[in-house]
């Protein structure tokens, strides 16, 4: 039997407004508990919400970037449930009339394929606070600083068929929101959170299987893992003659499992109704078009431009543009060095490897774009070889300064002085008479391979600084003279 | 001093006939001596009152005195008052010291008014008799065996018993007008959105509106001038130019068209009340008004629609009272669910719980369309009745309440009998229109209220129509026998 | 619509209200009376009538995105039933 996994994602994105969606309290991350929870956020009796214009502007930007319909009339509703991190006992959200309607985006998969994922809708809502489970006299502590932070919840159709597709879609959303600058998208800080609706069915079946909602997935890596684990669980269950129950499950990364959430065991009835403290928000075409005019270049457009302007392959361009910060970095390096292809290689290979290995984010990249461009210029003008360049780059990551300083300080400048190289060649040939004889007696077609030995010896003598081209020329000349 | 109207107190203070400190002390003494009988105050803010009075006297001395400078008033305990217990008549908030002032409290403070205290009320403003207060029922000064009406019964009793010259109140389905009627006062509920709701503890957000209880239409105009404001902290507050409600009080009523809805004089109306109201209609005719019979055909659906919408909104509005951040928390909760259920079970009284449960039911899966959505559709029909009527008339007139005051406990166990006491007042809340009640006579020694309903933002016209009636009659000057 | 004791117990669970079994029976009776009143709505002809959530059919004003609130934790937590280290304490929360 061949199984197919069907996945839909609900992505919560914190919008990077200064103040909360319904109050004037700050949304800054990391403040002392409850110091950013004002009377409105705490649901003090008599307090009332007033909606933040910037949250709407951001949501409209997102909708436009997703090629989605914009809800010209949107209505906040109350979703009623009790939880200590939800001060009002209801979450103010949108249901019937959300700010962003249906849309569709193209997602790039590995191997150059693309996939269309339909957006069901996206709505504005308020975030809840946090429950801290450390032991406070056997109780939980509640921090409401996060309560009221604006969120857009982005709900996809169940269009994805594998964990890889889900991750690619999530990355695409991440890319769009960070390009727009409407969120920092930091999954580790909870600025972007993902719930996955997962079901399985036999390949070819029309009908969707019973789905489970997996919560608490807080990294790209875990999205893939959680979906695969859940799909396997469901398949095993069905193959053993069981049935999947529709439920909310928690992903436990440490135990590599999903398990039912106890707090969601009792079926809830959210009793949505329009919030009487807030009025319908109506946006006109002029407002929406003005926002359209402010949209930055988005990942797809940037990718196509990189292909045209810098002659990159579509795949390389897609990799470079998946994050705005990387795209901007690459473009600075390309412009400053005048060497787009070298710049692309260095950003995608050496820099990426370094960031990955040192677990550094692009935001904290220790090598400035100008520095990398300086390095590339020195490769291009022959001051250093590609091999030495890697050494210089490593020094740069340690903060040793720009390329010229490092080359100077460490004496890494390539030796192109013919006299010096000739001396090195003579020494090597004199010290390896046996190999020289072998070379001379060998067939013409075996010689190039044997040449490597001499080049290696010479480069060793020069500590890698001899200009390889000059070494080759002089070596050939000397060998023919022997 | 306690028999003077607010208008008279303002001129007395400015003429230095008495100081605000003397006036305030006088009222505090009266409250201390007499309120045990009426139970109209939950909290008396003696120290604050005397300090505010002293500050008012200083301002009066400099001649730079804002409109209500030195005039003592009482606030319904539904309005948040910084540093002062704000209980909303509930055990749930018995220990709640508001951390901020409601916008209207701030408005009165800036206008120089002196706060005497916080008045008793039905718990969370849910009631028509003041019997649901955690702090015990308020007695009607006209007959202490009878109810003062509700939910603003404490404000009404305090003003009727001359324990405050005027008081703030709130009206979700008649909570200003019905106590005004039952206690022989003038009470106005402005257009929805005319007065800020910020800091007024919500019962039903789309119906709640603050207003005032006074002893004359002129006093109501003076108080409403201060209360009404645009407030950007309340999304439902309307940015409409403010007007001086005293400016048009003396306008002649010649040419005024008064609509009298058939439906307000049908079955259920006490015949003696009907008689008194008919006499008031004659008075208006004599003042030059044209009386025009009209129909508000959906009137009978107002109470049913209200008892879906108000409980639905209240069921969510009262979810914040969960014992986590403020308010009552039960002793030794065994777990989270136990904390919620016992804190709320102990903190809320029966009527509040009943309405939360009705609202929960009306919004629950499978019933939303049949109840909540249907009620909101009917609400539009009710509003349309008024819109159609106001095409032909300037104001609408009828009884405020089907009966005068009644004895405690006389409505028995049937909540619906009590709900029907608001049959004439509820429709204006559903439509968001301004409504006013003025005394128009007595039945068996009990006051009867005449209700006037105006078009949107026509508070000035309503107060003018009320004031002209009070110039021609003296019902509003009659005092409860024991205070006279 | 009439409701019975068990309906009331379900509603009380949703609304997090402690209600005794006996009280639930009484409440069921009084709420059934209210629902009987409310059921008069069903007779109304509301075809093509849009629901009215707000009396004035007004629209939302939007607030500029500025931080206007400062830290008031001390005064706001002054009347909290239980706090520690600036946190509100509640019986253990289970996920």
Image (spheres, grey):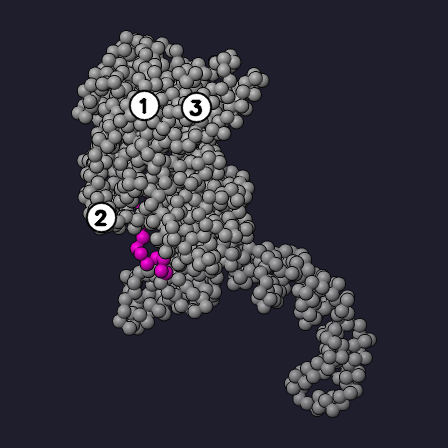
Label 1 chain ID:
B
Pair 3/1: label in front:
3
Residue neighbourhood size for the residue with mark 3, other residues' Cα within 10 Å, grouped as few (<14), some (14–19), many (≥20): some
Residue A271 among those drawn in magenta: yes
Q: Could you say which quadrant of the image residue B34 lies in?
A: top left
For image coordinates 41% across by 20% down, the residue present is: B165
Q: CA distance from mark 2 to mark 3?
A: 46 Å
Residue B137 among those drawn in magenta: no
Q: Is residue B309 left or right of residue A463?
A: left
Circle 1 sits on which residue? B141
Indicate which disc residue B29 carries: 3
Pair 2/3: label in front:
3
Give, as a single range, the part of the protein colored magenta. Answer: A261-273
Residue neighbourhood size for the residue with mark 1, other residues' Cα within 10 Å, grouped as few (<14), some (14–19), many (≥20): many
Instruction: Tell me where residue B426 appears, x and y as whole percent.
Output: 28, 29
Indicate which disc residue C22 carries: 2
Q: Is residue B136 above or below residue B186?
A: below
Near-viewer residue (C80 or A339): C80
Q: Is residue B434 visible?
A: no
Pair 1/2: label in front:
1
Q: Is residue B87 visible?
A: yes
Near-viewer residue (B229 or B392): B229
């Amino acid at each position: 039997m061949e199984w197919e996994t069907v996945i839909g994602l609900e992505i919560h994105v914190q919008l990077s407004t200064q103040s909360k969606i319904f109050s004037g309290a700050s949304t800054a991350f990391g403040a002392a508990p409850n110091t950013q929870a004002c009377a409105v956020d705490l649901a003090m009796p008599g307090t009332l919400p007033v909606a933040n214009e910037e949250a709407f502007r951001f949501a409209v930007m997102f909708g436009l970037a997703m090629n989605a319909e914009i809800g010209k009339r949107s209505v906040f509703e109350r979703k009623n449930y009790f939880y200590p991190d939800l001060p009002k006992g209801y979450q103010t959200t949108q249901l019937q009339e959300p700010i962003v309607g249906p849309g569709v985006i193209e997602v790039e998969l590995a191997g150059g394929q693309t996939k269309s994922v339909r957006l069901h809708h996206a709505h504005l809502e308020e975030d809840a606070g946090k429950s801290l489970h450390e032991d406070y006299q056997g109780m939980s502590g509640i921090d409401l600083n996060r309560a009221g932070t604006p969120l857009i919840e982005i709900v996809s159709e169940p269009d994805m068929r594998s964990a890889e597709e889900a991750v690619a879609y999530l990355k695409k959303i991440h890319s769009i929101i960070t390009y727009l600058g409407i969120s920092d998208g930091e999954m580790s800080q909870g600025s972007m959170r993902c719930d996955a609706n997962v079901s399985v069915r036999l390949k070819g079946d029309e009908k969707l299987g019973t789905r489970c909602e997996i919560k608490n997935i807080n990294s790209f890596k875990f999205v893939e893992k959680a979906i695969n684990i859940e799909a396997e669980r469901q398949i095993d269950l069905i193959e053993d003659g069981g049935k999947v129950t529709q439920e909310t499950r928690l992903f436990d990364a440490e135990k590599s499992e999903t398990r039912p959430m106890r707090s969601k065991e009792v079926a809830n009835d959210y009793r949505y109704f329009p919030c009487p403290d807030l009025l319908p928000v109506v946006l006109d075409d002029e407002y929406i078009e003005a926002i359209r005019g402010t949209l930055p270049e988005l990942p797809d457009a940037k990718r196509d431009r990189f292909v045209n302007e810098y002659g990159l392959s579509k795949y390389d361009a897609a990799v470079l543009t998946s994050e705005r910060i990387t795209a901007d970095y690459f473009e600075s390096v390309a412009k400053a060095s005048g060497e787009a292809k070298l710049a692309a290689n260095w950003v995608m290979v050496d820099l990426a490897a370094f960031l990955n290995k040192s677990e550094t984010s692009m935001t904290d990249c220790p090598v400035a774009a100008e520095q990398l461009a300086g390095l590339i210029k020195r490769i291009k003008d022959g001051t250093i070889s590609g091999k030495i360049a890697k050494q210089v780059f490593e020094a740069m990551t340690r903060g040793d300064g720009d390329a010229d300083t490092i080359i100077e300080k460490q004496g890494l400048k390539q030796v192109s002085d013919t006299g010096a190289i000739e001396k090195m060649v003579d020494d090597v040939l004199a010290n390896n008479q046996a190999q020289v004889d072998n070379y001379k007696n060998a067939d013409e077609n075996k010689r190039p391979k044997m040449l490597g030995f001499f080049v290696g010896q010479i480069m060793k003598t020069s500590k890698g600084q001899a200009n390889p081209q000059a070494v080759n020329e002089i070596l050939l000349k000397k060998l023919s003279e022997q | 001093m306690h028999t003077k109207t607010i208008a008279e107190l303002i001129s007395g203070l400015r003429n230095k006939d008495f100081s605000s400190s003397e006036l305030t002390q006088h009222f505090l003494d009266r409250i201390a001596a007499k309120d045990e009988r009426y139970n109209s105050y939950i909290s008396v803010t003696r120290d604050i009152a005397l300090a505010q009075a002293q500050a008012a006297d200083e301002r009066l001395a400099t001649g730079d005195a804002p409109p209500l400078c030195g005039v003592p008033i009482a606030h319904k305990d539904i309005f948040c008052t910084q540093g002062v217990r704000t209980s909303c008549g509930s055990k749930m908030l018995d220990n709640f010291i508001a951390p901020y002032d409601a916008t209207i409290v701030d408005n009165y403070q800036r206008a120089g008014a002196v706060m005497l205290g916080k008045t008793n009320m039905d718990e969370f403003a849910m009631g028509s008799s003041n019997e649901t207060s955690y702090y015990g029922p308020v007695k009607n000064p006209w007959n202490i065996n009878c109810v003062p009406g509700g939910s603003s019964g404490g404000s009404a009793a305090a003003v009727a018993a001359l324990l405050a010259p005027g008081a703030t109140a709130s009206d979700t389905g008649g909570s200003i007008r019905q106590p005004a009627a039952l206690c022989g006062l003038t009470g106005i509920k402005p257009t929805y959105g005319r007065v800020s709701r910020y800091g007024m503890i919500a019962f039903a957000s789309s119906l709640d509106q603050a207003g005032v209880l006074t002893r004359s239409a002129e006093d109501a105009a003076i108080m409403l001038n201060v209360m009404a404001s645009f407030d950007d902290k309340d999304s439902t507050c309307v940015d409409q130019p403010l007007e001086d409600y005293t400016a048009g009080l003396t306008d002649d009523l010649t040419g005024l068209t008064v609509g009298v809805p058939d439906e307000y004089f049908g079955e259920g109306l006490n015949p003696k009340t009907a008689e008194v109201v008919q006499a008031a209609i004659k008075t208006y005719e004599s003042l030059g008004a044209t009386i025009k019979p009209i129909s508000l055909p959906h009137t009978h659906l107002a109470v049913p629609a209200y008892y879906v919408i108000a409980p639905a909104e209240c069921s969510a509005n009262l979810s914040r009272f969960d014992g986590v951040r403020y308010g009552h928390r039960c002793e030794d909760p065994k777990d989270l669910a136990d904390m919620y259920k016992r804190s709320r079970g102990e903190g809320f009284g029966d009527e509040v719980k009943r309405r939360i449960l009705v609202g929960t039911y009306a919004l629950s899966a499978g019933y939303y369309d049949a109840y909540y959505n249907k009620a909101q559709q009917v609400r539009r029909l009710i509003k349309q009745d008024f819109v159609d009527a106001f095409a032909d008339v300037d104001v609408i007139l009828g009884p405020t309440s089907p009966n005068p005051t009644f004895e405690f406990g006389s409505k028995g166990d049937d909540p619906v009998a009590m709900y029907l006491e608001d049959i004439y007042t509820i429709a204006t809340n559903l439509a968001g229109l301004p409504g006013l009640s003025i005394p128009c006579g007595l039945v068996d020694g009990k006051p009867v209220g005449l209700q006037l309903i105006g078009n949107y933002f026509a508070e000035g016209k309503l107060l003018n129509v009320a004031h002209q009636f009070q110039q021609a009659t003296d019902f509003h000057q009659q005092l409860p026998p024991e205070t006279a | 619509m009439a409701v019975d004791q068990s309906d009331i117990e379900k509603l009380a669970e949703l609304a997090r209200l402690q209600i005794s079994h006996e009280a639930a029976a009484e409440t069921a009776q009084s709420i059934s009376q209210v629902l009987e009143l409310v059921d008069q709505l069903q007779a109304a002809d509301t075809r093509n009538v849009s629901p009215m959530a707000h009396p004035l059919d007004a629209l939302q004003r939007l607030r500029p995105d500025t931080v206007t609130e400062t830290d008031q934790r001390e005064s706001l937590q002054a009347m909290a039933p239980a706090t520690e280290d600036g946190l509100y304490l509640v019986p253990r929360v289970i996920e």
